């Protein structure tokens, strides 16, 4: 898989990765659009469902995504629900996951650079397809800055209450 891929947006380059994507019924259509885009950009997509827009509970799919990321089955995750809030909370129950709810490319970039986020969460009722794609590209193109952020990120998986 080595090297970089070129997306439809020539200024954005990211190495291909194995990515799981999951949603609830409210974000089913956005999940389908983003899965296609990810595949077109050269990534391997693992669709964890749902596979239609029948009503489902976002925690069930958030937990599936968290397991895939937490066990290393995939390198990154995309979590979607109506607001993005519920599914991001579900994903973050796994200490190996750092899901960041984003709504613009800059927050997606910072999620990677400062927080070493391995899951991006977005709300289908709050973000359009083009903005979601831009966020996803920024997230996948970003790299963890390390340095002063390393200790803080380590505390996310190992809290000292």
Image: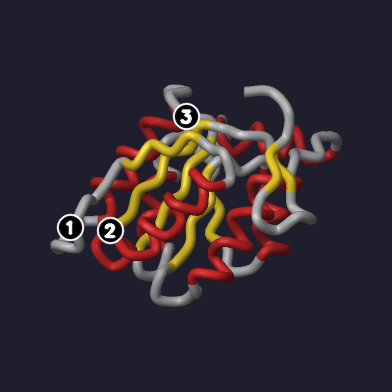
Image coordinates of residue 49 in percent, x first then y, are 27, 47
The crowding category of the residue bearing disc 3, from other C-alpha atoms within 10 Å (few below 14, some 14 to 19, many at least 20), is many
Q: Considering only order in the chain, which callout, 1 or 2, is on the residue closer to the N terminus?
A: 2
For the residue labelled by badge 2, is the local secondary structure a helix, a strand or a loop? loop
**Inter-mark Cα distance, 3 to 1:** 23 Å
Pointer 1 residue: 56
Q: Quadrant of the N terminus?
A: top right
Left or right: residue 76 versus residue 11 is left
Q: Is residue 62 above or below residue 45?
A: below
Left or right: residue 86 versus residue 159 is left
Q: Considering only order in the chain, which callout, 1 or 3, is on the residue closer to the N terminus?
A: 1
Left or right: residue 137 versus residue 96 is right
**Inter-mark Cα distance, 3 to 2:** 20 Å
Image coordinates of residue 71 in percent, x first then y, are 42, 23
Q: Are marks 2 and 1 in contact (CB under 8 Å)?
A: yes
Pointer 2 residue: 24
**Which residue is depicted at the point 43% across and 54% down?**
88
Pointer 3 residue: 74
């Amino acid at each position: 898989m080595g090297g970089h891929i070129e997306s439809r947006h020539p200024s954005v380059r990211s190495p291909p990765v194995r990515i799981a994507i999951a949603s609830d019924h409210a974000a089913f259509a956005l999940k389908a659009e983003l899965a296609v885009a990810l595949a077109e950009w050269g990534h391997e997509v693992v669709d964890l469902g749902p596979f239609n827009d029948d009503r489902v509970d976002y925690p069930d799919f958030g937990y599936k995504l968290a397991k895939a990321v937490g066990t290393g089955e995939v390198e990154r995750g995309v979590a979607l629900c109506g607001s993005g809030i519920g599914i991001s909370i579900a994903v973050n129950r796994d200490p190996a996951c750092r899901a960041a709810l984003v709504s613009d490319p800059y927050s997606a970039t910072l999620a990677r650079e400062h927080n070493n986020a391995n899951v991006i969460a977005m709300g289908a009722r709050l973000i359009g397809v083009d903005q979601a794609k831009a966020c996803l590209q920024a997230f996948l193109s970003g790299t963890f800055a390390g340095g002063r952020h390393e200790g803080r990120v380590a505390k996310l998986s190992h809290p000292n209450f």
